[in-house]
Image (tube, helix red, strand yellow):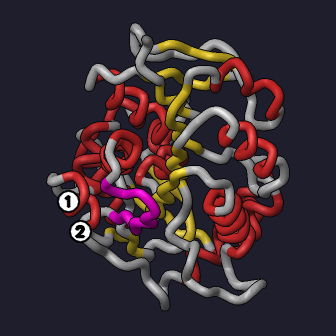
Amino acid sequence: MAQPEILVTGATGKVGGAVVARLHASGLPVRALVRGEANLPEGVRAVRGDLADPASLTEALDGVDTVFLVWPFLSPEGAAEVIDAIGKRARRVVYLSSAGVGKGKETGAPGEAITLFHTELERLIEASGLEWTALRPTGFASNTLGWADDVRASGVVRAPLAGLARPLIHEADIAAVAVRALTTDALLGARPLLTGPEAVTQERQVALIGEAIGRPLRFEELTLEEAVKEMRAAGYPAELVEAVLPAQASMLDDPEPVNDEVERITGTAARPFRQWAVDHAADFR
């Protein structure tokens, strides 16, 4: 009898891709949910499906025991149907949630739109009867890849909040915790808050990227109003613009915590942003 497989959604993204790679390198049976052609590690099975169309998941979930779920939308619309489809075939789901969940913020607080859909996804999963784990990471270090075009073009990163310090987390560390949750019972029913090992200002993040690529870079601070205009001009969804920048600004007075959960769970300390920059230097050259 074939060993049940692990299905990874978001498999072409930074976190999902790292989960796929780690499972595959460990010799575990993994399949990647994709909507089209995808560059996957040799030997990883790609299955077609779209979380926006729950009916398309039937074949992808056949023979699956466990699912790593990345929700790619800014609202929970359609999530109940997807979780129902997963629950009919799989035993366990590990959900990539957010550190903002569970902080008890009132409606209308900065970042509420993003927090609300993660909160609802967690609620739906917990009510589904599935075994579950909700991973709650702080900001992804990989989000700084949004600076790559500026770095390559001019060596100047134009962004707001130069002094905002965050414990950004390496996608490889999220993946290490996710694999632990997918393949053992150690995190059943847990909601671990996952952080990087230290808070680093955005200005310092740019400097560390410069060190990694061997080229001095400069941070040019924008006002929040200027940043909003640039995000809108770049085509970012309005709800994302309205959520992200105010939430980041609120962290100046209410900074994200730093903990050692990654090390406690995996036995290996979380990677610092300096290491992330080295690992991704090619993306900025």
What percent of the width, then of the height, locates residue 12? Answer: 55, 28
What percent of the width, then of the height, locates residue 52? Answer: 81, 37
Instruction: Confirm whether the magenta stretch covers residue 187.
Output: yes
| Quadrant in which the N terminus is drawn | top left
Residue 149 visible (yes or no): no
Residue indicated by mark 1: 263
At a point 50% along the width and 59% down the height, the residue shown is 134
Q: Nearer the viewer, residue 113 or 238?
A: 113
Q: To which quarter of the image does residue 163 belong?
A: bottom left
Residue 53 visible (yes or no): yes
129, above or below 200, in the image = above
Q: Are marks 1 and 2 in contact (CB under 8 Å)?
A: yes
How far apart marks 1 and 2 lie (CA) works out to: 5 Å
Per the rendered image, the range of residues in magenta is: 186-195
Q: Nearer the viewer, residue 241 or 12?
A: 12
Q: To which quarter of the image does residue 195 belong?
A: bottom left
Could you say which disc has been placed on residue 260 in the image? Answer: 2
At a point 71% along the width and 89% down the height, the residue shown is 106
At a point 63% along the width and 21% down the height, the residue shown is 62
Label 2 SS: loop
Q: Nearer the viewer, residue 96 or 141?
A: 96
29 horizontally vs 130: left or right: left
What percent of the width, then of the height, locates residue 234? Answer: 75, 48
